[in-house]
């Protein structure tokens, strides 16, 4: 009985989603918007019991403290993916049309294109001379 009390809290007041890019976020948003009868755009803000969705980073409000009182009141779902499928999907996304200005920026060493369209990893690689 003591073990159950640690696993199931009565104090859950919020719901939040953490996910890594290319791990089913779009599908997850579609499903959750139907389940909770909410708009898919609501994920970008705190609304009632919903906490802003976090992608590729932890929620700053928890101060990286696993015992944060706010975090202990939040049910967090995390999405992960097989790394081999992830890199194949990420490569396909980066080679697609949505990142043309980013690729052009990196290929021309910043004389054309736009670094603002790049994902963080590509910006970091470029700033460190790795691109």
Image (spheres, rainbow, N blue to C red):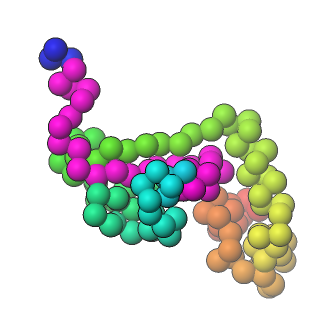
Image side of residue 10 versus residue 47, left or right? left
Above or below: residue 49 compared with residue 76: below
Task: Please report the residue visible at 26 percent of the width from the left and 26 percent of the height from the top.
Answer: 7
Work out whether residue 12 or residue 103 is closer to the camera in this orientation and state it: 12
Residue 55 pos. (x, y %): 51, 56
Residue 53 pos. (x, y %): 44, 58
Q: Residue furthest left?
A: 2
The N terminus: image quadrant: top left
- Res. 74 visible in picture: yes
Task: Please report the residue visible at 55 percent of the width from the left and 51 percent of the height from the top.
Answer: 31
Q: Residue furthest top?
A: 1
Residue 60 pos. (x, y %): 34, 59
Picture quarter containing residue 117? bottom right
Image side of residue 27 versus residue 73, left or right? right
Residue 104 is covered by the magenta coloring: no
Work out whether residue 97 or residue 7 is closer to the camera in this orientation and state it: 7
Residue 6 is covered by the magenta coloring: yes
- Res. 68 visible in picture: no
Image side of residue 105 versus residue 58, left or right? right
Residue 97 pos. (x, y %): 83, 69
- The magenta region covers 4-30
Q: Residue furthest bottom?
A: 111
The C terminus: image quadrant: bottom right
Task: Please report the residue visible at 34 percent of the width from the left and 51 percent of the height from the top.
Answer: 15
Picture quarter containing residue 127? bottom right
Task: Please report the residue visible at 23 percent of the width from the left and 44 percent of the height from the top.
Answer: 12
Above or below: residue 52 compared with residue 116: above
């Amino acid at each position: 009985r003591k073990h159950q009390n640690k696993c199931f809290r009565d104090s859950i007041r919020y719901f939040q989603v953490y996910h890594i890019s290319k791990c089913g976020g779009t599908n997850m948003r579609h499903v959750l918007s139907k389940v909770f009868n909410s708009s898919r755009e609501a994920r970008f803000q705190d609304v009632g019991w919903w906490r802003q969705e976090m992608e590729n980073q932890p929620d700053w409000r928890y101060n990286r403290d696993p015992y944060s009182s706010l975090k202990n009141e939040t049910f967090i779902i995390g999405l992960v993916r097989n790394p081999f499928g992830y890199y194949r999907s990420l490569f396909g996304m980066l080679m697609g049309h949505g990142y043309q200005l980013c690729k052009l920026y990196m290929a021309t060493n910043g004389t054309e294109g736009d670094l603002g369209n790049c994902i963080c990893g590509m910006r970091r690689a470029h700033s460190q001379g790795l691109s």
